[in-house]
Amino acid sequence: MFEIKKICCIGAGYVGGPTCSVIAQMCPSIKVTVVDVNEARINAWNSDTLPIYEPGLKEVVESCRGRNLFFSTSIDDAIREADLVFISVLSNPEFLAEGTAIKDLKNPDRVLIGGDDSPEGQKAVRALCAVYEHWVPKEKILTTNTWSSELSKLAANAFLAQRISSINSISALCEATGADVEEVARAIGTDQRIGNKFLKASVGFGGSCFQKDVLNLVYLCEALNLPEVARYWQQVIDMNDYQRRRFASRIIDSLFNTVTDKKIAILGFAFKKDTGDTRESSSIYISKYLMDEGAKLHIYDPKVPHEQILLDLSHPGVSEDNQVSRLVTISEDPYEACDGAHALVICTEWDMFKELDYERIHKKMLKPAFIFDGRRVLDDLHNELQVIGFQIETIGKKVSAKRIPFASSCEIPKFSLQDPPLKKPRV
């Protein structure tokens, strides 16, 4: 059997970098070269400050960089030298979850490898299987044809996204009836046919994969004349958009139907905890809706660079003219963000937000002081927070017994980062 000695991975991003770093660590006899056209990104991979944050990644890279792991911009040379080129040779979709990517790579549920039925295709499949067999049990390595492999990736993410949209739809019903979506999720999650994974109601899913893969599925269905199937999966995205708009509308309604010139602290900008990735983060959408209403946002995230936050919010589909420079301030810590704020909004489930001194925060906020918990991270603190004096609004549950009344009148339009920006008439 042909033995792979040199691997080239094209793309040094959130998938290529961690995946090939783990391959290099687990296969010390294989030379792994990760290439990218972005010289700054490659320089970062070769420095002490990696371009992405992922728990455990730095230790993996440092254990083999310069020995059998290399990062380079010499793409042509790396391809010519390689026995196997990731991306262009055969289908090997990843099933990584950011925040646990290193654990997922070292102890995967399965490794999926797809290839053509031709002798060359099967030879490539066997060669890549041999690479993974350095640390993955054979029974966890699945081989399929190329179409099955690619559709498995899309279907897996579509099913996960569907579960999130399903529980988020129930969260809206819970708020209207007085039920608690966490109790509902626990009750249905104990059914072994359903299970308890991905039943956490929130302000909506983000990240680079879920929306992209569901929309790819929708596109395939439309192209293959399966309109009913396309509409079914499109509803998963529509529900996610609805959850974000609904949460932003609730913030505005609770603050007496206007947030114009009001300071609002946004805690968390990454799309989930334990990552610095902001792609399709719900925080972007919530910030956009609040900026459109004239709110002054003070944003804090422990891992997302300040420049990335400003770049995301300056996207033409998110803001226009000088909106960001007028309305957005990046804070160095959560207490600074909340100082003088009318409300704090939790958009990312960072563990540190459970440990904050909320009595200190309440003293510095304007009254009445509101907490909008878009991730249900403060559930165990509700009684304590109410005693302090906070008005609490959370996903899928009515918290405040004596709620300050308001008349709901806010309707927030849909938008997409892929759509051209909407121009509002100047007054």
Image (cartoon, helix red, strand yellow):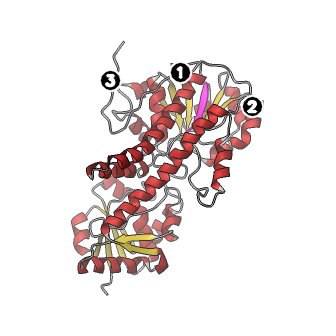
SS assignment at label 1: loop
Position of residue 219 in the picture relative to residue 210 (left or right): left
| Kind of residue at badge 2 | Gln
Per the image, label 2 sits on a secondary structure element best described as helix
From which residue to which does the magenta span run?
340-347
Q: Between residues 22 and 173, which one lies in front from this camera angle?
A: 173
* Disc 2 crowd, CA 10 A, few/some/many (<14, 14-19, 20+): some
- Mark positioned earlier in the residue sequence (2 or 1): 1
Question: Which residue type does callout 1 highlight?
Answer: Val
Q: Which residue is mark 1?
A: 259
- Say which label, 3 or 1, has the lower sequence index: 1
Label disc, if present, on residue 386 of the rendered structure: 2
Residue 119 lies, in percent from the top left, at 24, 81
* Residue at which label 3 appears: 423
From the image, which quarter does the N terminus lie in? bottom left
Tell me how far mark 3 sits from mark 1, CA to CA: 20 Å
User: How far, Cα to Cα, is label 2 from label 1?
Assistant: 22 Å
Q: Is residue 136 visible?
A: no
Mark 3 belongs to which amino acid?
Answer: Lys
Q: Is residue 57 magenta?
A: no
Is residue 48 visible in the rendered image? The answer is yes
